[in-house]
Image (tube, coloured by chain):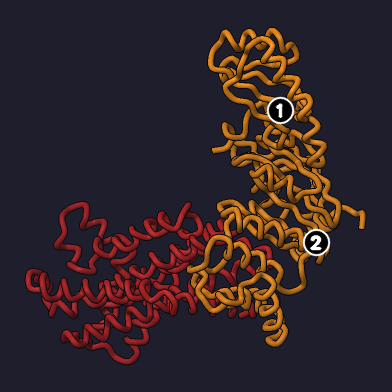
Chain colours: A orange, B red
Protein backbone atom coordinates (compact mmCIF):
# COMPACT_ATOMS: atom_id res chain seq x y z
CA UNK A 1 0.00 0.00 0.00
CA UNK A 2 1.38 3.34 -0.96
CA UNK A 3 -1.76 5.46 -0.77
CA UNK A 4 -2.20 8.18 1.82
CA UNK A 5 -4.07 7.38 4.99
CA UNK A 6 -4.23 10.99 6.05
CA UNK A 7 -4.02 14.04 3.82
CA UNK A 8 -4.23 17.48 5.33
CA UNK A 9 -3.76 20.73 3.54
CA UNK A 10 -3.98 24.26 4.83
CA UNK A 11 -5.69 23.25 8.05
CA UNK A 12 -6.60 26.24 10.16
CA UNK A 13 -8.37 26.48 13.48
CA UNK A 14 -8.87 29.34 15.89
CA UNK A 15 -10.64 29.61 19.23
CA UNK A 16 -11.92 33.15 19.30
CA UNK A 17 -8.91 35.36 18.58
CA UNK A 18 -6.43 32.68 19.42
CA UNK A 19 -5.08 30.96 16.32
CA UNK A 20 -4.27 27.40 17.31
CA UNK A 21 -3.53 25.87 13.91
CA UNK A 22 -2.14 28.17 11.29
CA UNK A 23 -2.06 26.25 8.00
CA UNK A 24 -1.00 22.67 8.59
CA UNK A 25 -0.12 20.31 5.73
CA UNK A 26 0.36 16.61 6.38
CA UNK A 27 0.59 13.49 4.29
CA UNK A 28 0.71 10.19 6.12
CA UNK A 29 1.25 7.09 3.95
CA UNK A 30 -0.83 4.05 4.90
CA UNK A 31 0.84 1.52 7.15
CA UNK A 32 3.31 3.95 8.69
CA UNK A 33 3.74 5.67 12.03
CA UNK A 34 3.64 9.42 11.90
CA UNK A 35 4.46 11.51 14.91
CA UNK A 36 3.37 15.04 15.66
CA UNK A 37 5.96 16.39 18.00
CA UNK A 38 5.62 19.51 20.02
CA UNK A 39 5.41 21.00 23.47
CA UNK A 40 2.19 21.65 25.36
CA UNK A 41 0.01 24.18 23.62
CA UNK A 42 1.55 23.62 20.18
CA UNK A 43 -1.80 22.43 18.76
CA UNK A 44 -1.31 18.68 18.80
CA UNK A 45 -4.58 17.78 20.48
CA UNK A 46 -6.51 20.25 18.34
CA UNK A 47 -5.06 18.62 15.23
CA UNK A 48 -6.12 15.20 16.48
CA UNK A 49 -9.59 16.52 17.35
CA UNK A 50 -10.10 17.88 13.85
CA UNK A 51 -8.71 14.79 12.15
CA UNK A 52 -10.98 12.54 14.23
CA UNK A 53 -14.17 14.54 13.44
CA UNK A 54 -14.50 15.84 17.00
CA UNK A 55 -13.94 19.45 15.95
CA UNK A 56 -14.68 21.40 12.82
CA UNK A 57 -11.81 23.10 11.06
CA UNK A 58 -12.02 26.80 10.16
CA UNK A 59 -10.23 26.26 6.88
CA UNK A 60 -8.33 23.75 4.76
CA UNK A 61 -9.15 20.22 3.72
CA UNK A 62 -8.70 17.04 5.68
CA UNK A 63 -9.09 13.58 4.22
CA UNK A 64 -8.80 10.57 6.48
CA UNK A 65 -8.92 7.08 4.98
CA UNK A 66 -9.88 8.76 1.72
CA UNK A 67 -12.94 10.50 3.16
CA UNK A 68 -13.46 14.17 3.85
CA UNK A 69 -13.82 14.71 7.61
CA UNK A 70 -16.27 17.56 7.16
CA UNK A 71 -18.72 15.91 4.79
CA UNK A 72 -18.16 12.17 5.22
CA UNK A 73 -17.99 12.07 8.99
CA UNK A 74 -19.58 8.63 9.32
CA UNK A 75 -17.21 7.00 6.85
CA UNK A 76 -14.23 8.55 8.62
CA UNK A 77 -15.48 7.42 12.03
CA UNK A 78 -15.93 3.88 10.75
CA UNK A 79 -12.28 3.73 9.69
CA UNK A 80 -10.56 5.23 12.71
CA UNK A 81 -9.87 4.56 16.35
CA UNK A 82 -8.93 7.23 18.83
CA UNK A 83 -7.12 6.98 22.11
CA UNK A 84 -7.32 10.39 23.66
CA UNK A 85 -4.93 12.29 25.83
CA UNK A 86 -6.39 10.88 29.01
CA UNK A 87 -7.26 7.23 29.25
CA UNK A 88 -10.93 7.33 28.29
CA UNK A 89 -11.99 4.38 30.39
CA UNK A 90 -14.97 4.00 32.67
CA UNK A 91 -13.59 3.90 36.20
CA UNK A 92 -16.68 2.43 37.79
CA UNK A 93 -16.74 -0.55 35.46
CA UNK A 94 -14.30 -3.45 35.42
CA UNK A 95 -11.78 -3.89 32.63
CA UNK A 96 -13.89 -6.60 31.11
CA UNK A 97 -17.06 -4.53 31.32
CA UNK A 98 -15.33 -1.63 29.59
CA UNK A 99 -14.43 -3.88 26.68
CA UNK A 100 -17.89 -5.45 26.70
CA UNK A 101 -19.42 -1.96 26.53
CA UNK A 102 -17.45 -1.31 23.34
CA UNK A 103 -18.48 -4.69 21.92
CA UNK A 104 -22.15 -3.90 22.65
CA UNK A 105 -21.92 -0.45 21.09
CA UNK A 106 -20.32 -1.98 18.00
CA UNK A 107 -23.22 -4.42 17.90
CA UNK A 108 -21.14 -7.57 18.04
CA UNK A 109 -23.28 -10.58 18.87
CA UNK A 110 -22.98 -11.86 22.43
CA UNK A 111 -20.84 -14.84 21.45
CA UNK A 112 -18.50 -12.86 19.25
CA UNK A 113 -18.39 -10.03 21.76
CA UNK A 114 -17.25 -12.36 24.52
CA UNK A 115 -14.62 -13.90 22.26
CA UNK A 116 -13.23 -10.51 21.22
CA UNK A 117 -13.15 -9.29 24.82
CA UNK A 118 -11.30 -12.39 26.04
CA UNK A 119 -8.84 -12.12 23.17
CA UNK A 120 -8.04 -8.49 23.89
CA UNK A 121 -7.67 -9.08 27.62
CA UNK A 122 -5.12 -11.76 26.83
CA UNK A 123 -3.32 -9.75 24.20
CA UNK A 124 -2.93 -6.76 26.48
CA UNK A 125 -2.06 -8.84 29.52
CA UNK A 126 -5.09 -7.71 31.50
CA UNK A 127 -6.65 -11.09 32.28
CA UNK A 128 -5.73 -11.02 35.97
CA UNK A 129 -7.37 -7.67 36.61
CA UNK A 130 -10.26 -8.15 34.18
CA UNK A 131 -12.81 -8.44 36.99
CA UNK A 132 -11.45 -5.53 39.00
CA UNK A 133 -12.81 -2.03 38.89
CA UNK A 134 -10.72 0.20 36.63
CA UNK A 135 -10.37 2.70 39.48
CA UNK A 136 -7.81 0.29 40.95
CA UNK A 137 -5.74 0.15 37.72
CA UNK A 138 -2.31 1.74 37.33
CA UNK A 139 -1.71 4.39 34.68
CA UNK A 140 -0.07 1.84 32.38
CA UNK A 141 -2.97 -0.59 32.70
CA UNK A 142 -5.49 2.15 31.96
CA UNK A 143 -3.61 3.08 28.80
CA UNK A 144 -3.52 -0.52 27.69
CA UNK A 145 -7.22 -0.94 28.36
CA UNK A 146 -7.89 2.33 26.56
CA UNK A 147 -6.08 1.07 23.48
CA UNK A 148 -7.72 -2.35 23.73
CA UNK A 149 -11.13 -0.62 23.75
CA UNK A 150 -10.17 1.15 20.54
CA UNK A 151 -9.49 -2.22 18.91
CA UNK A 152 -12.83 -3.89 19.74
CA UNK A 153 -14.78 -4.95 16.69
CA UNK A 154 -13.52 -4.44 13.19
CA UNK A 155 -10.01 -3.13 13.90
CA UNK A 156 -9.60 0.46 12.77
CA UNK A 157 -7.39 1.17 9.76
CA UNK A 158 -6.02 4.34 11.29
CA UNK A 159 -5.38 4.86 14.98
CA UNK A 160 -4.83 8.23 16.59
CA UNK A 161 -2.86 8.17 19.81
CA UNK A 162 -2.79 11.48 21.63
CA UNK A 163 0.18 11.48 23.98
CA UNK A 164 -0.07 7.75 24.65
CA UNK A 165 2.65 7.62 27.30
CA UNK A 166 2.35 10.95 29.08
CA UNK A 167 2.55 10.30 32.80
CA UNK A 168 3.63 6.68 32.50
CA UNK A 169 6.64 5.18 34.24
CA UNK A 170 9.54 4.11 31.98
CA UNK A 171 8.60 0.44 32.02
CA UNK A 172 4.99 1.06 31.03
CA UNK A 173 6.22 3.39 28.30
CA UNK A 174 8.31 0.61 26.81
CA UNK A 175 5.37 -1.78 26.94
CA UNK A 176 3.23 0.80 25.17
CA UNK A 177 5.89 1.30 22.50
CA UNK A 178 6.01 -2.44 21.86
CA UNK A 179 2.23 -2.54 21.53
CA UNK A 180 2.30 0.33 19.03
CA UNK A 181 5.03 -1.34 16.96
CA UNK A 182 3.10 -4.59 16.95
CA UNK A 183 -0.06 -2.86 15.76
CA UNK A 184 1.79 -1.63 12.71
CA UNK A 185 3.59 -4.87 11.95
CA UNK A 186 0.84 -7.37 12.79
CA UNK A 187 -2.30 -5.44 11.89
CA UNK A 188 -0.97 -3.07 9.24
CA UNK A 189 -2.54 -0.13 11.00
CA UNK A 190 -1.56 3.46 10.22
CA UNK A 191 -0.76 5.37 13.36
CA UNK A 192 -0.68 9.07 14.01
CA UNK A 193 0.69 9.76 17.43
CA UNK A 194 1.34 12.99 19.20
CA UNK A 195 4.03 13.31 21.80
CA UNK A 196 6.10 15.82 23.63
CA UNK A 197 8.81 13.26 24.17
CA UNK A 198 11.47 13.46 21.55
CA UNK A 199 12.82 9.99 22.19
CA UNK A 200 9.33 8.57 21.75
CA UNK A 201 8.98 10.06 18.27
CA UNK A 202 12.51 8.89 17.48
CA UNK A 203 11.71 5.35 18.67
CA UNK A 204 8.37 4.87 16.96
CA UNK A 205 7.87 7.14 14.02
CA UNK A 206 8.74 6.68 10.37
CA UNK A 207 8.21 10.38 9.89
CA UNK A 208 8.04 13.24 12.34
CA UNK A 209 6.46 16.66 11.99
CA UNK A 210 7.50 19.27 14.50
CA UNK A 211 4.60 21.48 15.53
CA UNK A 212 5.32 24.82 17.09
CA UNK A 213 2.70 27.45 17.85
CA UNK A 214 0.27 26.09 15.30
CA UNK A 215 2.73 25.73 12.44
CA UNK A 216 4.84 22.85 11.20
CA UNK A 217 8.42 23.98 11.52
CA UNK A 218 9.94 20.78 10.14
CA UNK A 219 8.96 17.45 8.70
CA UNK A 220 10.95 14.38 7.80
CA UNK A 221 12.41 11.12 9.04
CA UNK A 222 14.09 11.20 12.44
CA UNK A 223 17.44 11.13 10.64
CA UNK A 224 16.45 13.98 8.31
CA UNK A 225 15.70 16.09 11.32
CA UNK A 226 18.88 15.17 13.10
CA UNK A 227 20.82 16.21 10.02
CA UNK A 228 19.40 19.70 10.34
CA UNK A 229 21.36 20.38 13.48
CA UNK A 230 25.08 20.79 14.04
CA UNK A 231 26.94 17.48 14.22
CA UNK A 232 28.26 15.83 17.31
CA UNK A 233 30.60 17.79 19.49
CA UNK A 234 32.60 17.70 22.66
CA UNK A 235 31.43 19.97 25.40
CA UNK A 236 34.11 21.38 27.70
CA UNK A 237 33.14 23.23 30.84
CA UNK A 238 35.66 25.48 32.57
CA UNK A 239 35.66 27.02 36.01
CA UNK A 240 37.41 30.29 35.31
CA UNK A 241 37.21 32.80 32.49
CA UNK A 242 40.96 33.00 31.87
CA UNK A 243 41.09 29.30 31.05
CA UNK A 244 38.01 29.54 28.87
CA UNK A 245 39.63 32.42 26.97
CA UNK A 246 42.87 30.56 26.54
CA UNK A 247 41.10 27.41 25.34
CA UNK A 248 38.98 29.40 22.92
CA UNK A 249 42.17 30.90 21.44
CA UNK A 250 43.73 27.53 20.66
CA UNK A 251 40.57 25.69 19.63
CA UNK A 252 39.59 28.04 16.85
CA UNK A 253 36.67 26.00 15.48
CA UNK A 254 34.89 25.89 18.83
CA UNK A 255 31.84 27.93 19.75
CA UNK A 256 31.77 29.41 23.20
CA UNK A 257 28.99 30.01 25.66
CA UNK A 258 30.21 32.55 28.22
CA UNK A 259 27.28 32.17 30.50
CA UNK A 260 27.65 28.43 30.96
CA UNK A 261 31.49 28.72 30.71
CA UNK A 262 31.36 26.11 27.99
CA UNK A 263 33.19 25.46 24.74
CA UNK A 264 31.63 23.25 22.09
CA UNK A 265 34.26 21.63 19.93
CA UNK A 266 33.12 19.84 16.77
CA UNK A 267 34.24 16.22 16.97
CA UNK A 268 33.19 12.82 15.74
CA UNK A 269 33.38 11.57 19.31
CA UNK A 270 35.93 8.87 18.44
CA UNK A 271 38.89 8.08 20.74
CA UNK A 272 41.49 9.34 18.26
CA UNK A 273 40.05 12.82 17.90
CA UNK A 274 39.30 12.94 21.60
CA UNK A 275 42.93 12.11 22.43
CA UNK A 276 44.10 14.80 20.01
CA UNK A 277 41.88 17.34 21.72
CA UNK A 278 43.10 16.39 25.18
CA UNK A 279 46.74 16.48 24.04
CA UNK A 280 46.23 19.95 22.71
CA UNK A 281 44.76 21.15 26.02
CA UNK A 282 47.68 19.51 27.86
CA UNK A 283 50.15 21.23 25.61
CA UNK A 284 48.90 24.58 26.92
CA UNK A 285 48.43 23.23 30.49
CA UNK A 286 44.75 23.81 30.33
CA UNK A 287 42.23 21.60 32.09
CA UNK A 288 38.48 21.57 31.78
CA UNK A 289 36.29 20.93 34.79
CA UNK A 290 34.08 18.59 32.83
CA UNK A 291 34.03 16.92 29.44
CA UNK A 292 31.08 15.34 27.70
CA UNK A 293 30.59 13.96 24.22
CA UNK A 294 27.33 15.10 22.72
CA UNK A 295 25.54 13.46 19.82
CA UNK A 296 22.54 15.39 18.54
CA UNK A 297 19.14 14.26 19.70
CA UNK A 298 15.73 15.62 18.92
CA UNK A 299 16.06 18.16 21.71
CA UNK A 300 18.78 19.79 19.65
CA UNK A 301 16.55 19.60 16.61
CA UNK A 302 13.83 21.42 18.44
CA UNK A 303 16.22 24.07 19.66
CA UNK A 304 17.68 24.53 16.20
CA UNK A 305 14.27 24.73 14.53
CA UNK A 306 12.39 26.96 16.88
CA UNK A 307 15.16 28.87 18.56
CA UNK A 308 13.68 27.84 21.86
CA UNK A 309 14.67 24.94 24.04
CA UNK A 310 11.78 22.59 24.77
CA UNK A 311 11.97 23.20 28.51
CA UNK A 312 11.23 26.87 28.03
CA UNK A 313 8.33 26.35 25.67
CA UNK A 314 6.80 23.46 27.56
CA UNK A 315 4.80 24.31 30.62
CA UNK B 1 -35.25 3.80 21.99
CA UNK B 2 -32.26 2.70 19.99
CA UNK B 3 -29.96 -0.07 21.19
CA UNK B 4 -27.30 2.55 21.91
CA UNK B 5 -29.66 4.35 24.28
CA UNK B 6 -30.33 1.12 26.14
CA UNK B 7 -26.61 0.33 26.40
CA UNK B 8 -25.88 3.83 27.71
CA UNK B 9 -28.74 3.61 30.18
CA UNK B 10 -27.46 0.27 31.44
CA UNK B 11 -24.06 1.86 31.94
CA UNK B 12 -25.55 4.74 33.93
CA UNK B 13 -27.58 2.38 36.11
CA UNK B 14 -24.43 0.37 36.80
CA UNK B 15 -22.75 3.58 37.90
CA UNK B 16 -25.51 4.22 40.40
CA UNK B 17 -25.26 0.68 41.71
CA UNK B 18 -21.45 0.87 41.95
CA UNK B 19 -21.29 4.27 43.53
CA UNK B 20 -23.71 3.99 46.44
CA UNK B 21 -22.27 7.05 48.20
CA UNK B 22 -23.77 9.39 45.62
CA UNK B 23 -27.20 7.79 45.99
CA UNK B 24 -26.75 7.71 49.74
CA UNK B 25 -26.07 11.43 49.69
CA UNK B 26 -29.10 12.09 47.49
CA UNK B 27 -31.34 9.92 49.67
CA UNK B 28 -29.97 10.63 53.11
CA UNK B 29 -29.40 14.39 53.09
CA UNK B 30 -33.03 15.35 52.47
CA UNK B 31 -34.09 12.95 55.23
CA UNK B 32 -31.56 14.46 57.66
CA UNK B 33 -32.80 17.93 56.75
CA UNK B 34 -36.36 16.78 57.24
CA UNK B 35 -35.60 15.43 60.72
CA UNK B 36 -33.73 18.60 61.55
CA UNK B 37 -36.49 20.94 60.50
CA UNK B 38 -39.36 18.91 61.86
CA UNK B 39 -37.80 18.22 65.27
CA UNK B 40 -35.61 21.27 65.85
CA UNK B 41 -37.25 24.20 64.09
CA UNK B 42 -40.72 22.95 63.28
CA UNK B 43 -42.30 24.16 66.51
CA UNK B 44 -40.77 27.59 66.05
CA UNK B 45 -42.51 28.14 62.72
CA UNK B 46 -46.18 28.86 62.84
CA UNK B 47 -47.46 27.76 59.47
CA UNK B 48 -51.07 27.07 60.40
CA UNK B 49 -50.89 23.32 59.85
CA UNK B 50 -48.77 20.46 61.14
CA UNK B 51 -45.21 21.35 60.15
CA UNK B 52 -44.54 17.94 58.62
CA UNK B 53 -47.54 18.43 56.33
CA UNK B 54 -46.26 21.88 55.38
CA UNK B 55 -42.63 20.91 54.82
CA UNK B 56 -42.90 17.58 53.00
CA UNK B 57 -43.69 19.03 49.53
CA UNK B 58 -40.75 21.44 49.81
CA UNK B 59 -38.46 18.71 51.00
CA UNK B 60 -39.47 16.60 48.02
CA UNK B 61 -38.11 19.34 45.83
CA UNK B 62 -34.99 19.52 47.93
CA UNK B 63 -34.58 15.78 47.42
CA UNK B 64 -34.65 16.27 43.64
CA UNK B 65 -32.00 18.99 43.91
CA UNK B 66 -29.67 16.99 46.15
CA UNK B 67 -29.30 14.34 43.49
CA UNK B 68 -28.15 16.85 40.91
CA UNK B 69 -24.59 17.37 42.13
CA UNK B 70 -23.78 13.72 41.42
CA UNK B 71 -25.30 13.96 37.94
CA UNK B 72 -23.30 17.08 37.06
CA UNK B 73 -20.10 15.47 38.31
CA UNK B 74 -20.61 12.24 36.42
CA UNK B 75 -21.53 13.98 33.14
CA UNK B 76 -18.50 16.20 33.48
CA UNK B 77 -16.10 13.38 34.17
CA UNK B 78 -17.39 11.62 31.03
CA UNK B 79 -16.69 14.82 29.12
CA UNK B 80 -13.30 15.74 30.56
CA UNK B 81 -11.93 12.20 30.62
CA UNK B 82 -12.66 11.78 26.93
CA UNK B 83 -15.31 9.09 27.31
CA UNK B 84 -17.82 11.23 25.44
CA UNK B 85 -15.24 11.77 22.69
CA UNK B 86 -14.80 8.04 22.48
CA UNK B 87 -18.57 7.57 22.11
CA UNK B 88 -18.73 10.34 19.51
CA UNK B 89 -16.07 8.70 17.37
CA UNK B 90 -18.05 5.46 17.64
CA UNK B 91 -21.07 7.34 16.28
CA UNK B 92 -23.09 6.92 19.46
CA UNK B 93 -25.73 9.62 19.24
CA UNK B 94 -25.88 12.59 21.51
CA UNK B 95 -29.41 11.60 22.47
CA UNK B 96 -28.22 8.18 23.65
CA UNK B 97 -25.32 9.52 25.73
CA UNK B 98 -27.23 12.37 27.38
CA UNK B 99 -30.60 10.67 27.85
CA UNK B 100 -28.82 7.93 29.80
CA UNK B 101 -27.62 10.52 32.27
CA UNK B 102 -30.99 12.29 32.53
CA UNK B 103 -32.88 9.06 33.17
CA UNK B 104 -30.32 7.89 35.72
CA UNK B 105 -30.66 11.23 37.47
CA UNK B 106 -34.43 10.89 37.43
CA UNK B 107 -34.17 7.40 38.90
CA UNK B 108 -32.02 8.70 41.78
CA UNK B 109 -34.67 11.40 42.37
CA UNK B 110 -37.47 8.87 42.49
CA UNK B 111 -35.58 6.69 44.97
CA UNK B 112 -34.79 9.70 47.16
CA UNK B 113 -38.36 10.97 47.14
CA UNK B 114 -39.76 7.53 47.82
CA UNK B 115 -37.52 7.21 50.88
CA UNK B 116 -38.37 10.75 51.99
CA UNK B 117 -42.11 10.20 51.79
CA UNK B 118 -41.69 6.94 53.69
CA UNK B 119 -39.92 8.73 56.54
CA UNK B 120 -42.48 11.56 56.40
CA UNK B 121 -45.27 9.04 57.01
CA UNK B 122 -43.35 7.71 60.02
CA UNK B 123 -43.20 11.27 61.35
CA UNK B 124 -46.93 11.69 61.08
CA UNK B 125 -47.32 13.07 57.56
CA UNK B 126 -51.03 12.98 56.87
CA UNK B 127 -51.88 14.03 53.32
CA UNK B 128 -55.49 14.23 52.20
CA UNK B 129 -54.67 13.60 48.53
CA UNK B 130 -56.92 11.40 46.42
CA UNK B 131 -55.52 8.78 44.07
CA UNK B 132 -55.73 11.26 41.23
CA UNK B 133 -53.92 13.90 43.29
CA UNK B 134 -51.11 11.42 43.97
CA UNK B 135 -50.87 10.82 40.25
CA UNK B 136 -50.48 14.57 39.85
CA UNK B 137 -47.73 14.56 42.50
CA UNK B 138 -45.86 11.84 40.64
CA UNK B 139 -46.31 13.74 37.38
CA UNK B 140 -44.94 17.00 38.78
CA UNK B 141 -42.01 15.26 40.47
CA UNK B 142 -41.05 13.39 37.31
CA UNK B 143 -41.42 16.54 35.21
CA UNK B 144 -39.27 18.50 37.65
CA UNK B 145 -36.67 15.73 37.81
CA UNK B 146 -36.59 15.64 34.02
CA UNK B 147 -36.23 19.44 33.69
CA UNK B 148 -33.61 19.71 36.44
CA UNK B 149 -31.84 16.67 34.96
CA UNK B 150 -31.44 18.30 31.54
CA UNK B 151 -30.26 21.57 33.04
CA UNK B 152 -27.76 19.70 35.20
CA UNK B 153 -26.49 17.66 32.26
CA UNK B 154 -25.90 20.94 30.42
CA UNK B 155 -24.07 22.39 33.44
CA UNK B 156 -22.00 19.24 33.69
CA UNK B 157 -21.04 19.35 30.00
CA UNK B 158 -20.10 23.01 30.13
CA UNK B 159 -18.05 22.92 33.35
CA UNK B 160 -14.26 22.81 33.20
CA UNK B 161 -13.74 20.05 35.74
CA UNK B 162 -15.80 17.60 37.82
CA UNK B 163 -15.18 19.81 40.86
CA UNK B 164 -16.60 22.94 39.22
CA UNK B 165 -19.46 20.85 37.84
CA UNK B 166 -20.39 19.78 41.36
CA UNK B 167 -20.16 23.40 42.44
CA UNK B 168 -22.30 24.60 39.53
CA UNK B 169 -25.15 22.50 40.86
CA UNK B 170 -24.97 24.15 44.29
CA UNK B 171 -27.29 27.07 43.41
CA UNK B 172 -29.91 24.50 42.46
CA UNK B 173 -29.45 22.86 45.86
CA UNK B 174 -29.74 26.22 47.64
CA UNK B 175 -32.71 27.52 45.68
CA UNK B 176 -35.35 25.52 47.59
CA UNK B 177 -34.30 27.25 50.83
CA UNK B 178 -35.21 30.58 49.26
CA UNK B 179 -38.65 29.42 48.30
CA UNK B 180 -41.75 28.49 50.24
CA UNK B 181 -40.23 25.04 50.92
CA UNK B 182 -39.30 25.57 54.56
CA UNK B 183 -41.30 28.65 55.57
CA UNK B 184 -44.07 30.53 53.76
CA UNK B 185 -42.76 33.32 51.55
CA UNK B 186 -44.88 35.97 53.29
CA UNK B 187 -42.86 35.43 56.49
CA UNK B 188 -39.62 36.45 54.76
CA UNK B 189 -38.05 39.91 54.73
CA UNK B 190 -38.54 42.33 51.81
CA UNK B 191 -36.53 41.46 48.70
CA UNK B 192 -36.10 37.85 49.71
CA UNK B 193 -39.85 37.56 49.90
CA UNK B 194 -40.40 38.77 46.34
CA UNK B 195 -37.62 36.50 45.17
CA UNK B 196 -39.20 33.55 46.93
CA UNK B 197 -42.61 34.34 45.47
CA UNK B 198 -41.45 34.55 41.89
CA UNK B 199 -38.72 31.95 41.66
CA UNK B 200 -39.70 28.75 39.83
CA UNK B 201 -39.59 26.43 42.82
CA UNK B 202 -42.35 28.21 44.72
CA UNK B 203 -45.17 27.46 42.26
CA UNK B 204 -43.88 23.89 41.94
CA UNK B 205 -43.93 23.46 45.72
CA UNK B 206 -47.33 25.11 46.00
CA UNK B 207 -48.65 22.76 43.35
CA UNK B 208 -47.36 19.74 45.25
CA UNK B 209 -48.72 21.17 48.51
CA UNK B 210 -52.14 21.72 46.94
CA UNK B 211 -52.21 18.20 45.51
CA UNK B 212 -51.16 16.61 48.80
CA UNK B 213 -53.80 18.64 50.70
CA UNK B 214 -56.39 17.46 48.24
CA UNK B 215 -56.92 21.08 47.11
CA UNK B 216 -55.02 21.34 43.82
CA UNK B 217 -54.70 24.82 42.32
CA UNK B 218 -54.74 24.86 38.54
CA UNK B 219 -53.06 28.31 38.41
CA UNK B 220 -50.07 27.09 40.40
CA UNK B 221 -49.98 23.90 38.38
CA UNK B 222 -49.93 25.77 35.09
CA UNK B 223 -47.11 28.04 36.22
CA UNK B 224 -45.22 25.04 37.61
CA UNK B 225 -45.56 23.06 34.40
CA UNK B 226 -44.55 26.10 32.33
CA UNK B 227 -41.40 26.57 34.42
CA UNK B 228 -40.51 22.89 34.16
CA UNK B 229 -40.99 22.82 30.40
CA UNK B 230 -38.99 26.03 30.06
CA UNK B 231 -36.12 24.75 32.20
CA UNK B 232 -36.11 21.41 30.39
CA UNK B 233 -36.00 23.14 27.01
CA UNK B 234 -33.16 25.48 27.99
CA UNK B 235 -31.21 22.57 29.47
CA UNK B 236 -31.86 20.36 26.46
CA UNK B 237 -30.78 22.96 23.90
CA UNK B 238 -27.79 24.08 25.92
CA UNK B 239 -26.67 20.48 26.50
CA UNK B 240 -27.12 19.67 22.82
CA UNK B 241 -25.03 22.56 21.56
CA UNK B 242 -22.28 22.03 24.16
CA UNK B 243 -22.14 18.34 23.31
CA UNK B 244 -21.71 19.17 19.65
CA UNK B 245 -19.09 21.87 20.11
CA UNK B 246 -16.92 20.64 22.92
CA UNK B 247 -14.28 18.01 22.29
Question: Disc 2: which chain?
Answer: A
Q: Percent position (x, y) of residue A162?
A: 65, 53
- What numbered label is drawn on residue A189? 2
Q: Percent position (x, y) of residue A284?
A: 66, 9
Q: Percent position (x, y) of residue A242?
A: 57, 8
Whole-number angstrom distance, CA of label 1 to CA of label 2:
32 Å
* Residue shown at the point (53%, 61%) measured from the top left: B239
From this view, report whether residue B151 is shown above or below residue A48.
below
For label 1, the residue is A304
Numbered disc total = 2
- The label nearer to you, 1 versus 2, is 1
Residue at the farthest left position: B44
* Residue shown at the point (31%, 76%) measured from the top left: B27
- In the picture, the quarter occupied by the N terminus of chain B is bottom right
Q: Are marks 1 and 2 on the same chain?
A: yes
Question: Disc 1: which chain?
Answer: A
Q: Percent position (x, y) of residue B37?
A: 16, 71
- In the picture, the quarter occupied by the C terminus of chain B is bottom right
From this view, report whether residue B51 is shown above or below residue A241.
below
Foreground pick, A112 / A20: A112
- Residue B247 visible (yes or no): no
**Left or right for A30, reference B61:** right
The secondary structure type at the circle numbered 2 is: loop
- What numbered label is drawn on residue B88? none
- Residue A91 visible (yes or no): yes
Amino acid sequence: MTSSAIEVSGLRKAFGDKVVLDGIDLDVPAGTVFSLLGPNGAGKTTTVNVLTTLMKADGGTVRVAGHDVATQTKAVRAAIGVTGQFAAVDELLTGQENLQLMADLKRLGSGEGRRVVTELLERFDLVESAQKSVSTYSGGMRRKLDLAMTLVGRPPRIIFLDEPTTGLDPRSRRTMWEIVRELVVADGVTILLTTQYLDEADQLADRIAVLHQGRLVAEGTPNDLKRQVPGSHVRLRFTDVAELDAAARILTDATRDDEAMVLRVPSDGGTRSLRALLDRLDEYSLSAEELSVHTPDLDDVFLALTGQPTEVVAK
Amino acid sequence: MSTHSIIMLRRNFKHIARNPTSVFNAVLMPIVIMLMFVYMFGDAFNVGVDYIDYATPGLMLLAVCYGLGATATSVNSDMTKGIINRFKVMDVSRAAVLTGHVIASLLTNVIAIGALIGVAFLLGFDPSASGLDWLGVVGIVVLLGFAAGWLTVALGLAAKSPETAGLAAVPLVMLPFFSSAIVPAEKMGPGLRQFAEYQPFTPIIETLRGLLNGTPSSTDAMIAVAWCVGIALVGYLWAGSTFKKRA
